[in-house]
Amino acid sequence: MMTFAKANDLLRLAQLAASRRLGISLEEISQEFGISHRTAQRMTSALEDNFANVVVVEDDDRRRRWRIQSPIPERLQPRQENTIEALEIAARAARDENRLRHARALEDLRDSLITRLSPRDALRSEADAEAVLSALGQVARPGPKVAMRPEVTDVLIEALRGPFKMRIVYGDTDAETRTVEPHGLLLGLRSYLVARQAGRGENLRHFRLDRIHSAECLDESFPIQSGFSLNDHAAQAFGAYQDPAQYGEIVWRFLPEAASRAAEFQFHPNQSAEYRDDGSLIVRFKAAGWLEMAWHLYQWGDKVEVLEPAGLRALVEGHARPDFSALP
């Protein structure tokens, strides 16, 4: 995360680059801020990353100089990719929760922001936002979630935008680094990075985000697996955990006193539901992740019965309580 001191230095550098007709060189930045040549280079990289109207030119001595095209402070133009992404994610979440008024307001704000950008920057921002959004699979379930490290998720978003390969430390803090090719994120009770790992074949693997201790985005792109769809991939699981050995038909029977409440739930994107003559509700879908299913089914007490598969039925047997005072 950028500290306030670093943010203030960056804004000061932007003002200097805007006020000097010829821009500012690395040597001048080093003198102004009392920093090394390498740190000055990192500051110019941050300047280019955060302001859209930066130009780099060479002076008569063939030194590179950084200049803000418009000298008017009010016209400094921070990049808007992250803002547009955030508005789009919030709007989609509002629509999923049927908060349509909020969704329309967020979409209007997003569109207003895009219209103020230059055609080039608007096209780039929309493309970058769509790349990130297509790689975010929202499979959240009720309940607490494991906190994710902001410094890791920021790198993940940058890598997905490319897409670029990543170098991560996973599992133990002193584990060897792994190079992975990120395909998307599954966000839920536990959240996972979906990625190929170099040297481990074409199969996609799942890395728990809370066990990624550090991450670095590499300057090396890669092709997304042919035919890959994160939505289809996510639909193979009830929550976020994937286990091909458990994938199969799931059949639950909700007792008549719970049927109307269960009918209000979408347990899975591809579920089907039918009422029986006795007033009970049968819900069917195909997925894996018996443990996450068991966690959810426990909330229904003795008002739900697992018909299929036998493995899940055995997992929840003996744990259905009759004394819950309310349904989920």
Image (cartoon, rainbow, N blue to C red):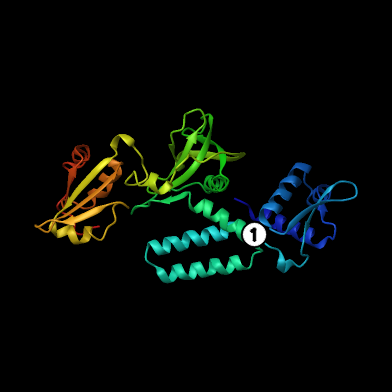
236 or 41, nearer to the observer:
236
Q: Confirm whether residue 69 shows in the render.
A: yes
In the figure, is residue 183 to the left or right of 305? right
Name the outermost residue toward the front: 227
Residue 95, by quadrant, is bottom left
Residue 53, by quadrant, is bottom right
Name the outermost residue toward the right: 60
In the figure, is residue 274 to the left or right of 125? left
**Position in image of residue 94 (x %, y %):** 42, 64
**Position in image of residue 298 (x %, y %):** 23, 48
Count of marks placed on residues:
1
Name the residue type under label 1: Asp
Q: Is residue 120 above or below residue 238?
A: below
Quarter of the image that includes the C terminus = bottom left
Query: Mark 1, residues whose alpha carbon is within 10 Å: few (<14), some, or many (≥20)?
Result: some
Q: Confirm whether residue 187 shows in the render.
A: no
Residue 326, by quadrant, is bottom left
Q: What residue is drawn where x is 56% and y is 38%?
A: 222
**Position in image of residue 325 (x %, y %):** 19, 59
Name the outermost residue toward the left: 278
Q: What residue is drawn where x is 58% and y is 46%?
A: 162
Q: What residue is drawn where x is 51% and y is 41%?
A: 224
217 or 247, nearer to the observer:
247
**Position in image of residue 51 (x %, y %):** 69, 57
Residue at the spot of label 1: 121
Q: Is residue 87 above or below residue 182?
A: below
215 or 276, nearer to the observer:
276
In the figure, is residue 134 to the left or right of 318? right
